[in-house]
Image (tube, helix red, strand yellow):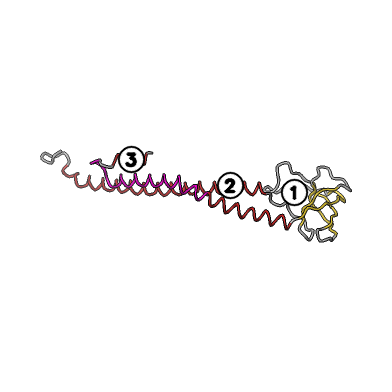
Amino acid sequence: MRAISGLWRWRNNPLRRTTDLVESWVALVTLLLTLVAAPVVGSVVGSVAQDALQQSVRDQRQARHLVTATVVRKLDQVALEPDPETSSGRDVGSRVVADWTAPDGTRQHGPVTASLKSPQPGDHFPLWTDRHGRPVTRPLDSTTATTHAVLAGFGAAMLTAGLVEGIRRLIVWHLVRRRYARWDQAWDRAGPDWGRTGTGS
C-alpha cells in the first residue's frame, strides 16, 4: 500500500525527483514479487521435493524388509541414537547379539539394535534389513517425507522473499547515495554565494 500511495503521491508533484519515482516503482515491484513470485517458487520447490521424497519412500519400501530377529545376548554398549528422519522420540533400543533370517533365506548373526528396553535371550523383535540381510534403518515414511517437502517449499519461499527485499534495499541504498551526491554538488555551487546580498538569499 505504501508503494501504491507513493506512486500516486509523486505522480504530479512538482517537487518529485527521479529517484523518488524510481524508489516507489521498486517498492511496488518488490511487493508484487513477494506476493506472487515467492509463493510460486515455494510451491514449485515443495512439489519437486515431494515427488523426489515420495519416490525415495517407494524405493526404500521395495529395498528394505522387516524380519524377525531373536536375541542371543545383550551387549554392554550404549544404544545407538535413533535416526531423526525416520524415528520418533519414543523409539529406544538396546544393543544385542541376535540371529535372523534374511529375505533371501540366508541365516544371519551379529550385533544390532533391538527395539526392546530389557532384552533377554530368546526375545523376538522386528529388524529392518536389505534383501541380503544386512541391518538398515527403518524406511522413510510418507508423512515424514511430506513434512520435509513442505519445509523445503516454505524455506524456498522465505528465501525468495528475502532475496527480493535484499535487492530492493540495495537499490534504495544506491538511490540515497545518488541523492546525497547531488545535494553535495548543489551545495558546492551555492556555497560561495550563500547569504550574500543580491544572490537571492
Residue ID for mark 2: 150
Q: Return the x and y of residue 177 as percentages of the image width and height.
A: 32, 47
Residue ID for mark 1: 80
In the displayed structure, does residue 14 sit left or right of residue 142? left
Which span of residues is magenta-colored?
A: 13-42
In the displayed structure, does residue 181 sit left or right of residue 116? left
Residue 61 versus residue 16: which sits nearer the camera?
61
Up/down of 157 relative to 131, above or below: above
Contact flag, marks 2 and 3 (Cβ < 8 Å): no
In the displayed structure, does residue 101 sit left or right of residue 27? right
Contact flag, marks 2 and 1 (Cβ < 8 Å): no
What is the C-alpha distance between the residues marked 3 and 1?
60 Å
Asked if the stretch drawn in magenta spans residue 19, the answer is: yes
The kind of residue tagged 2 is: Val
Q: Return the x and y of residue 69 as percentages of the image width and height.
A: 83, 52
Asked if the stretch drawn in magenta spans residue 49, the answer is: no
Q: Nearer the viewer, mark 2 or mark 1?
A: 2
For the residue carrying disc 3, how many other residues have a C-alpha within 10 Å: few (<14), some (14-19), or many (20+)?
A: some
Q: Quick one: quadrant of the C terminus?
A: top left
Residue 192 versus residue 10: which sits nearer the camera?
10
What is the C-alpha distance between the residues marked 2 and 3?
36 Å
Q: Determine whether the residue tagged by mark 2 lies in a helix, strand or loop.
A: helix
The kind of residue tagged 3 is: Gly
Name the residue at 78% across, 53% down.
66
Q: Return the x and y of residue 56 as percentages of the image width and height.
A: 66, 55
Q: Return the x and y of residue 23 as percentages of the image width and height.
A: 34, 45
For the residue carrying disc 1, how many other residues have a C-alpha within 10 Å: few (<14), some (14-19), or many (20+)?
A: few
Sequence-first disc among 2 and 3: 3
Up/down of 5 relative to 84, above or below: above
The kind of residue tagged 1 is: Leu
Q: Which mark is residue 6?
A: 3
